[in-house]
Image (cartoon, rainbow, N blue to C red):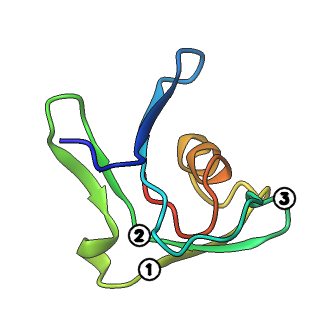
Amino acid sequence: VIETGSFWISNPDNGICMKITPSSGQTSTSRPQDGDKVTVLYQCRLQDGTIIDSTKTYGRHLKFRMGENAVIVGLERGVASLRAGETA
């Protein structure tokens, strides 16, 4: 089931596929840039649905600065495609 306003993006070059769901009160149109601090909750799954990593495991949000290679490339690229309040 895809919520109203949701859409899928995929990039065959890097294998990232995400469902983007804007928040109802979203007003930001900008995406994070290199040097911006971001805070995310994430869950990384294999194609069969097996969870291989999740912030739920650690019990806290993941915080990092964009462009500093602090997280795996796929996560940073995915976050770079989102606006504040969107989920993927």
Cα distance between the residues tagged 3 and 1? 19 Å
Q: Are marks 2 and 1 in contact (CB under 8 Å)?
A: yes
Badge 1: residue crowd in 10 Å (few <14, some 14–19, many ≥20): some
Q: Residue at 74% of width from left, 57% of height from top? A: 31
User: Whole-percent x and y of residue 70?
Assistant: 66, 61
Q: Residue at 79% of width from left, 70% of height from top? A: 36
Mark 2, residue position: 41
Query: Image check: 60 left or right of 12?
Result: left
Quarter of the figure with residue 11:
top right
Q: Residue at 85% of width from left, 67% of height from top? A: 35
**Count of numbered circles on the image:** 3
Query: Image check: 54 left or right of 64?
Result: left
User: For the N terminus, which image quadrant?
Assistant: top left
Q: Look at the picture and state if 9 lies above or below 85.
A: above
Mark 3, residue position: 34
Label 1: element kind: loop
User: Whole-percent x and y of residue 3?
Assistant: 29, 50
Cα distance between the residues tagged 2 and 1? 5 Å
Marker disc for residue 61: 1
Label 3: element kind: loop
Query: Image check: 7 left or right of 38?
Result: left
Q: Are marks 3 and 1 in contact (CB under 8 Å)?
A: no
Badge 2: residue crowd in 10 Å (few <14, some 14–19, many ≥20): few
Q: Earlier in the sequence, mark 2 or mark 1?
A: 2
Q: Are marks 3 and 2 in contact (CB under 8 Å)?
A: no
Q: Residue at 41% of width from left, 69% of height from top? A: 41
